[in-house]
Image (cartoon, rainbow, N blue to C red):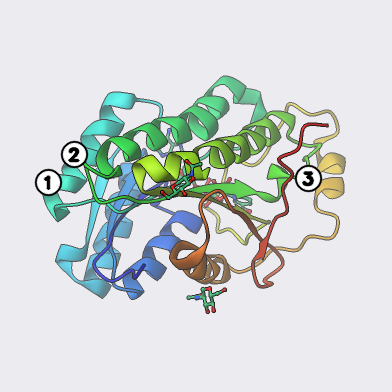
């Protein structure tokens, strides 16, 4: 698979990691559609990237991933604009266990809505096949004691990736499903949502979760995604942490 002229949707792509993905994929010749709830950041990101990569290569769609109708309309707008859809990066999230119902609706149900829509638009017959990338966390495998419910949502998308990513589904849809787990990554002042007041002695819990981890660079996280999008097999799980080369995460299909 080559990225040149592939059409890629990134949810939560207005800032931070999602925006870094957009920039990297544009460099590799893709067309980008950013879906985000935050219109101010989305429009700004879109304008800045248009200036750098050309007006016709990127659009912004206002989209709340908890709203199926808005999500579907954004897919339609993307298809109308670019003529096809090849890649969905499920990236939008919130991290705050205090608002656990919303957290689950964004981080898990939002990924499910995205997946169902991606099949609707990309499956062989309706589309040309494609790729779904679910963005996980280091807590997709190693629980964060500071954020049990966030951890649950990031574990759940491993199951979503393994089941839909299986050869059984790939055979019928031509859509690969991959999970790219990201360790702690540097953030700017816009990143807000990470104080998590639900856990007693939250700061101490955060220290435990950060053991062995240091904040890595945004552009490292974005660069490491490219070979995975190009090459990773459906159902595979990957982790990028501490600015190291990404590694495949082992997984057992066994019943114990
Ligand atoms: N930043 C880190 O240290 C880190 C660590 C591990 C995993 N990750 C993962 O990387 C991904 C991106 O993280 P980030 O730090 O860039 O996030 P962020 O919180 O900085 O940005 C998330 C984006 O999602 C958008 N969003 C939130 N709710 C939405 C909704 N209902 N509909 C549409 N958009 C919505 C926000 O507006 C924002 O633009 C997430 O999936 C996260 O789990 C990040
Ligand atoms: C997928 O298709 C290939 C080729 O047709 C076939 O060999 C394989 O058994 C199929 N796998 C599943 C799980 O359906
Ligand atoms: C894809 O995988 C093959 C085999 O593992 C490897 O030789 C090749 O360099 C990879 N390509 C990219 C772009 O990572």
Q: Residues within 10 Å of mark 3 (few under 14, many from 20)?
A: few
Q: Residues within 10 Å of mark 2 (few under 14, many from 20)?
A: some
Residue 193 visible somewhere in the drawing: no
Q: For the residue labelled by badge 1, is the local secondary structure a helix, a strand or a loop? A: helix
Q: Quadrant of residue 245?
A: bottom right
Q: Quadrant of the C terminus?
A: top right
Q: Residue furthest toward the top?
A: 101
Q: For the residue labelled by badge 3, is the local secondary structure a helix, a strand or a loop? A: loop
Q: Which residue is mark 3?
A: 142
The vertical placement of 164 against 105, above or below, is below
Residue 144 visible somewhere in the drawing: yes
The number of numbered discs placed on residues in the rendered structure image is 3
Residue 246 screen position, x and y as percent: 64, 67
> Separation of disc 3 and disc 2 at Cα?
37 Å
Q: Which residue is mark 1?
A: 80
The vertical placement of 81 against 155, above or below, is below
Question: Which residue is drawn at the image coordinates 42% and 59% (left, top)?
Answer: 19
Q: Residues within 10 Å of mark 1 (few under 14, many from 20)?
A: few
| 79 to the left or right of 129 | left
Q: Which residue is mark 2?
A: 76
Q: Are marks 2 and 1 in contact (CB under 8 Å)?
A: yes
Q: For the residue labelled by badge 2, is the local secondary structure a helix, a strand or a loop? A: helix
Q: Quadrant of the N terminus?
A: bottom left
Q: Quadrant of residue 56?
A: bottom left
Question: Which residue is drawn at the image coordinates 33% and 58% (left, top)?
Answer: 45
- Which disc number belongs to residue 52? none
> Separation of disc 2 and disc 1 at Cα?
6 Å
> Separation of disc 3 and disc 1 at Cα?
41 Å
Q: Earlier in the sequence, mark 3 or mark 1?
A: 1
Residue 4 screen position, x and y as percent: 28, 71
């Amino acid at each position: 698979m080559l990225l040149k002229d592939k059409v890629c949707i990134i949810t939560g792509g207005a800032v931070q990691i999602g925006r870094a993905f957009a920039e990297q994929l544009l460099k590799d010749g893709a067309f980008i559609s950013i879906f985000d709830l935050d219109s101010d950041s989305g429009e700004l990101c879109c304008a800045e990237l248009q200036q750098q990569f050309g007006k016709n290569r990127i659009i912004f769609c206002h989209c709340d991933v908890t709203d199926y109708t808005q999500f579907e309309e954004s897919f339609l707008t993307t298809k109308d604009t670019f003529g096809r859809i090849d890649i969905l990066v499920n990236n939008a999230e919130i991290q705050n266990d205090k608002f656990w119902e919303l957290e689950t609706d964004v981080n898990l149900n939002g990924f499910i809505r995205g997946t169902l829509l991606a099949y609707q638009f990309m499956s062989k017959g309706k589309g040309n096949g494609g790729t779904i990338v679910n963005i996980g966390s280091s807590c997709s495998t190693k629980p964060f004691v500071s954020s049990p419910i966030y951890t649950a949502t990031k574990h759940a998308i491993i199951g979503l990736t393994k089941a839909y990513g299986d050869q059984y589904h790939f055979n019928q849809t031509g859509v690969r499903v991959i999970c790219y787990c990201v360790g702690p990554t540097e953030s700017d002042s816009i990143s807000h949502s990470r104080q998590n007041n639900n856990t007693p002695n939250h700061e101490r819990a955060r220290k435990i979760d950060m053991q062995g981890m240091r904040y890595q660079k945004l552009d490292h996280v974005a660069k490491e995604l490219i070979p995975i999008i190009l090459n990773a097999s459906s159902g595979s799980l990957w982790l990028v942490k501490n600015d190291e080369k990404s590694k495949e995460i082992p997984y057992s299909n066994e019943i114990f």
